[in-house]
Amino acid sequence: MNDFEQYIKQTEPDKKEKAKLWRTAIGLQQVDGLKPSAYLIEIAKQNIEGDISFEEVKNRIDAYYKTQANKSTDTDDRTEEADKVSARVAEILSEKTFSFSPIEYINIHKRLFNGIYKFAGKIRDYNITKSEWVLDGETVLYADFNNLKETLEYDFEQEKKFNYKGLSKQQIIEHLAHFTTYLWQIHIFGEGNTRTTAIFLIKYLRKLGFKEVNNDLFAENSWYFRNALVRANYESIAKNIHKTNKYLIRFLANLLLNENNILKNRELHIHFVTPENSDVKQENDTVNARIDTVNDTVFSLIKANPTITAEEIRIKLNIGIATAKRKIKKLKDNGKIERIGSDKTGHWKILIKN
């Protein structure tokens, strides 16, 4: 990551911007444990200097690996992947075009992995599992391959309908965490889902007006980003492990609000125990309290009107009906409220007064 520091510190805007793109592009390869070659760093610097275009970068990388193959040397296929995908990520992020659609999402995957994966840009036609360190070897339950296209289109349609008007920054981050979590859990591709999701999210945030997104977070904490998505989609009631967006919210708060939440992968492990009186514990308590504040808005409405419906909550808070129902469910799961009677004629019983 320090290879581009000299450009980021200098004042020339174009070089600084390109250097940041390359940092993000290379950092994202860490989600799959990939590192670029010294050759990529060399030609990336030439691109930053303005000596060669992104197209020329890609052509040189292709030629380099063809030469390596002809020499019958023991080239690392994963290093080749890291080099090629890094160049493609930097190019995509440099472009000022974007369309919020499933087609755009699929096309990003195709551009990233064309010639690397046979299934680049293709929806998987088989079910998958992935052993996760953060889950002690367990896997997230990904979407069934029979319903991938419909599930993807549904999530995009719900997001298109969502109205951000009137929401606080924290509520916006919470909603973006939900959307990103659902999008990633579908896992429509055989490989490369996290990198595709990250690129799509960065470009979507730009569309939403977040022009100063701190993409260094993806460069320096891409593995944390992936592990946060894993924890947001895994639960085992039998083991008292529940899905949680708090880690992803922490990441997004740093990304969009320039907060300084501690991002440590070991905290995401399902068996991690926070040491008493540690700085980590204090920081975690602060984050959890902030997340609870968002849900308190729904809780306050229910306390004020025990007969209020999810639709009425949706209208008052200007949020989607799915979001309103999720917040109500969280309050029920946390033992704060209980439904008495039917959905139509019943009412809410408050179990926690304060």
Image (cartoon, rainbow, N blue to C red):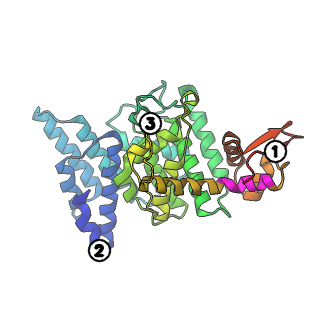
The reply to whether dot 2 and dot 1 touch (C-beta < 8 Å) is: no
Marks 1, 3: nearer the viewer = 3
* Disc 1: which residue: 348
The Cα–Cα distance between marks 2 and 1, rounded to whole angstroms, is 59 Å
Q: Can you see residue 108?
A: no
Residue 12 tag number: 2
* Disc 3: which residue: 271
Residue 4: quarter of image: bottom left
Mark 3 residue element: loop
Q: Earlier in the sequence, mark 2 or mark 1?
A: 2
Q: Give, as a three-letter code, the residue at label 1.
A: Trp
Q: Give, as a three-letter code, the residue at label 2.
A: Glu
Q: Quadrant of the N terminus?
A: bottom left
Image coordinates of residue 62 in percent, x first then y, are: 23, 44
Marks 2, 1: nearer the viewer = 1
Q: Earlier in the sequence, mark 3 or mark 2?
A: 2
Q: Magenta segment, which residues?
A: 295-303
Mark 1 residue element: strand
Mark 2 residue element: loop
Image coordinates of residue 119 in percent, x first then y, are: 40, 32
Query: Which residue is farthest left?
Result: 71
The Cα–Cα distance between marks 1 and 3, rounded to whole angstroms, is 35 Å
Q: Earlier in the sequence, mark 1 or mark 3?
A: 3
